[in-house]
Image: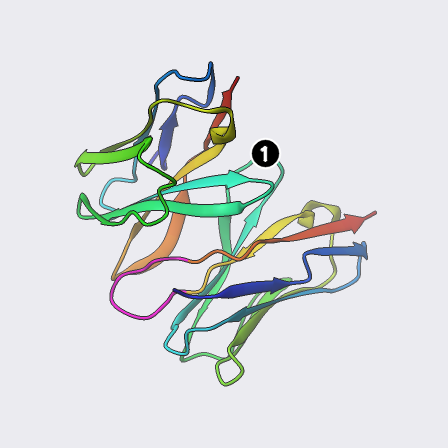
């Protein structure tokens, strides 16, 4: 298995632009998590899905952030409009809840909003 | 939600020394206790975990111990090496059927050669 795949790996954009981050979880996993990591705030859980259904989005900062999981093999995290304070590394992770609880992280997307 | 604290936030040791990082949590029903390692510029990866029916688990130079009564678990690294330098996170699982991980703020371990 290729592991969790994220794209793009790096994104530089200007304030006000829309940003879409993509994630492909490990095949067979039933849960997917989006995290944001910054020096100031550490590793924050933004939202997680179980069987493609959003379960907890209390970590989503504000309405500018949205996430979808249209099927078991794909998820997106969208920021519209982006702001400089959104600059961070965004990780996607997947796991097989109820059987093995290890979280497998993707390589992350390093986002810089100018 | 679960309140998680890690101590210390930074740990500096000499190569060959031992290192211990402690994680305290608030949910007495927590039943899964993992440690993740994140090297600079890389993703977090699980290095060891323990469940609530076990008090200690070892894997070569690393071990995890659990004290459910006191609600804390610790990561022990013996004979530290420069490649152990990284940020270590605990992420105890809260109660209930859904797993909402709460990651600690991380401990930066620096091993000086």
Residue A21 image position (x, y, % from top left): 35, 26
Residue A45 visible in the snapshot: yes
Residue at image location 41% in from the left, 42% down from the top: A35
Residue A36 image position (x, y, % from top left): 45, 39
Q: Which residue is mark 1?
A: B41
> Residue B33 appears in which quarter of the rendering?
bottom left
Residue B65 visible in the snapshot: no
Is residue A44 shown above or below A106? below
**So how many labels did they put on this image?**
1
Residue A41 image position (x, y, % from top left): 54, 45
Is residue A8 shown above or below A106? above
Majority SS type along the magenta span? loop
Left or right of B29? Residue B41 is right
- Judging from the image, what secondary structure is the residue with disc 1 in? loop
- For label 1, the crowd category at 10 Å Cα-Cα, with few meaning under 14, some 14 to 19 and many 20 or more, is few
Give whichever of B109, B103 is nearer the camera: B103
- Check the image and tell me how it is coloured: rainbow
- To which chain does the residue with label 1 belong? B
Give whichever of A78, A108 is nearer the camera: A78
Is residue B11 shown above or below B69? above
The image quadrant where one finds the N terminus of chain A is: top left
Residue at image location 43% in from the left, 37% down from the top: A91
Which region is colored magenta?
B93-101
Q: Outermost residue, bottom direction?
A: B69
Residue at image location 24% in from the left, 40% down from the top: A27
Does the magenta-highlighted stretch encompass residue B82? no
Left or right of B105? Residue A31 is left
Residue B21 image position (x, y, % from top left): 65, 64
Left or right of B10? Residue A78 is left
Residue at image location 55% in from the left, 72% down from the top: B73
């Amino acid at each position: 298995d290729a592991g969790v795949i994220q794209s793009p790996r790096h994104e530089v954009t200007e304030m006000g632009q829309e940003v879409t981050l993509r994630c492909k979880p490990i095949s067979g996993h039933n849960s997917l998590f989006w995290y944001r990591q910054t020096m100031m705030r550490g590793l924050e859980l933004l939202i997680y899905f179980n069987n493609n259904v959003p379960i907890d989005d209390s970590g989503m900062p504000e309405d500018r952030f949205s996430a979808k999981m249209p099927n078991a093999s794909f998820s997106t995290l969208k920021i519209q409009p982006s702001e400089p304070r959104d600059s961070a590394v965004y990780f996607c992770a997947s796991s097989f809840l109820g059987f093995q609880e290890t979280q497998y992280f993707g390589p992350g997307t390093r986002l810089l909003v100018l | 939600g679960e309140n998680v604290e890690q101590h210390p936030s930074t740990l500096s040791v000499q190569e060959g020394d031992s290192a211990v990082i402690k994680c305290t949590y608030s949910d007495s029903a927590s039943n899964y206790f993992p440690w993740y390692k994140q090297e600079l510029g890389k993703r977090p990866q699980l290095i060891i975990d323990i469940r609530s029916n076990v008090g200690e688990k070892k894997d070569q130079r690393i071990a995890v111990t659990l004290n459910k009564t006191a609600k804390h678990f610790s990561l022990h690294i013996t004979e530290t090496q420069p490649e152990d330098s990284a940020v270590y996170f605990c992420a105890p699982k809260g109660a209930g059927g859904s797993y909402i991980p709460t990651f600690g703020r991380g401990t930066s371990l620096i091993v000086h050669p």
